[in-house]
Image (cartoon, rainbow, N blue to C red):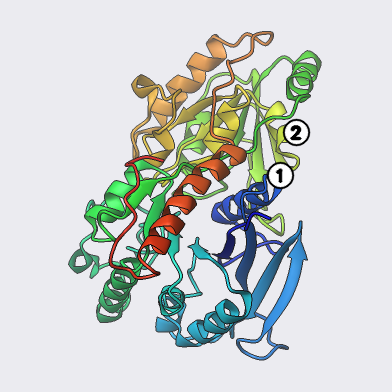
């Protein structure tokens, strides 16, 4: 019987307690690897429950994947959120008990970089997947306290003095995480923008490859759902998923529609909060068009949301690492109006002439809104753009994993020879 590689997957969240885009990637790829008979995965994630002992472990299972949940105390020091020796002790034990072949680290905020050292103590190869800027920014997304994107490129820690509460602590964090990341065999990024920025900022230079995130593709009945909606109401429908946040561009969207001298359209805004509070108290009555707040969607029912819109508004005011929502929309033939926001523009349908600069006046967005309204043809579908599926992402990961394992076997589990992968995987 062929030995399936056993991956120890580490992410701050994992089913049954899922939250955030990186968690979606971790879960979907793990399931695809299992379903295709490529690898089996055991997950490690966090919970924080006062009734359980600190750093005790409980096990759950979803879709055939075991998840070992480590209970962390709510009251932890600043240092323990990025480098926690207690976490290392737990991971040491799990590695000893589970005997994985490889560790795949996703988002480890609140878990800490000691996990990397645990893997190296066990001579376990490590693939580190970077999804945001946690490794180079204390605030994780390079968004300053005034909700403005930092825009450093590269990030120089000495320039962070006005943004962090304790510069000495932030500098120690920066240096500790850079040293830890250098222990990885390969570091993956979802976009060229993210890789270039992180490596220029000193994060494991030369170890990075681009491993593009996947998206859930439309189901076979998607076009029928959208056609039925358009027959019932031919008006153009805009969609917005980012919430009432300035960094996601809500002020620009609000002002663009406030000054619009027509109302022959509707707008669906998604309440992505867990408790339906994002849009509580917001008044849309002064905005043109017919506005509706719709509940957050899951991966299993996203077609229902996208079948209800024609244009996605993606007005992010920071340089994101990927932009999953944009890919989900394009795969379904949804037109996207977007900003020039980092990794979000690395797709085959990007219209450079219509990209909106971060910080641009709402008037720029208003002109594009008017343009799509003037050209709206209810019976005509936008072409569906090819985007990477989670199955394709899993196959790309298989290639990375096999090369890492092969190199590790060749050198007896030492870290002297790094895996040399293509620039883009």
Circle 2: element type: helix
Q: Position of residue 79 (x, y in %)?
A: 40, 82
Q: Position of residue 325 (x, y in %)?
A: 56, 39
Residue in the picture at 41% in, 52% down: 188
Q: Quadrant of the C terminus?
A: top left
Residue contact between numbered discs 2 and 1, judged by CB atoms under 8 Å:
yes
Q: Residue furthest bottom?
A: 53
Q: Residue furthest front?
A: 1
Name the residue beneath numbered marker 2.
Answer: 304
Q: Quadrant of the N terminus?
A: bottom right
Name the residue beneath numbered marker 1.
Answer: 297
Depicted 117 relative to depicted 8: above or below: below
Task: Give the image quarter of residue 322.
Answer: top left
Which tag, 2 or 1, sits closer to the chain's start?
1
Confirm whether residue 129 shows in the render: no
Task: Give the image quarter of residue 416.
Answer: bottom left
Task: Give 302 or 311, whichever is nearer the viewer.
Answer: 302
Task: Give 293 or 283, whichever is nearer the viewer.
Answer: 293
């Amino acid at each position: 019987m062929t030995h399936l590689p056993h991956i120890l997957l580490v992410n701050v969240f994992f089913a049954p307690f899922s939250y955030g885009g990186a968690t979606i990637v971790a879960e979907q790829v793990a399931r695809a690897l299992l379903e295709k008979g490529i690898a089996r995965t055991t997950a490690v994630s966090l919970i924080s429950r006062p009734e359980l002992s600190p750093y005790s472990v409980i096990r759950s299972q979803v879709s055939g994947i075991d998840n070992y949940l480590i209970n962390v105390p709510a009251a932890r020091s600043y240092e323990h959120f990025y480098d926690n020796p207690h976490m290392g002790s737990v991971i040491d034990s799990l590695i000893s008990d589970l005997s994985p072949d490889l560790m795949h680290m996703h988002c480890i905020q609140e878990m800490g970089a000691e996990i990397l050292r645990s893997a190296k103590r066990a001579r376990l190869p490590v693939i580190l997947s970077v999804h945001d800027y946690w490794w180079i920014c204390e605030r994780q997304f390079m968004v300053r306290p005034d909700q403005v994107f930092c825009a450093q490129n590269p990030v120089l820690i000495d320039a962070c003095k006005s943004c962090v509460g304790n510069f000495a602590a932030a500098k120690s964090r920066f240096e500790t995480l850079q040293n830890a990341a250098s222990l990885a065999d390969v570091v993956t990024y979802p976009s060229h923008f993210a890789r270039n920025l992180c490596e220029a900022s000193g994060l494991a230079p030369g170890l990075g490859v681009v491993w593009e995130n996947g998206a859930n593709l439309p189901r076979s009945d998607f076009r029928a759902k959208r056609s039925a909606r358009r027959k019932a109401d031919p008006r153009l429908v805009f969609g917005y998923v980012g919430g009432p946040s300035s960094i996601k561009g809500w002020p620009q969207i609000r002002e663009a529609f406030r000054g619009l001298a027509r109302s022959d359209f509707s707008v669906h805004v998604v309440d992505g909060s867990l408790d339906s509070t994002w849009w509580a108290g917001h008044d849309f009555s002064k905005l043109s068009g017919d506005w509706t707040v719709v509940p957050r969607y899951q991966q299993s029912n996203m077609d229902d949301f996208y079948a209800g819109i024609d244009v996605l508004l993606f007005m992010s005011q920071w340089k994101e690492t990927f932009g999953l929502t944009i890919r989900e929309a394009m795969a379904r033939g949804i037109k996207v109006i977007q900003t020039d926001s980092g990794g979000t523009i690395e797709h085959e349908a990007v219209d450079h002439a219509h990209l909106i600069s971060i910080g641009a006046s709402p008037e720029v967005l208003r002109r594009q809104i008017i343009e799509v309204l003037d050209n709206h043809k209810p019976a005509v579908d936008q072409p569906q753009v090819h985007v990477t599926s989670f199955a394709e992402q899993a196959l790309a990961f298989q290639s990375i994993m096999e090369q890492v394992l092969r190199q590790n076997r060749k050198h007896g589990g030492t870290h002297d020879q790094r895996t040399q992968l293509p620039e883009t995987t």
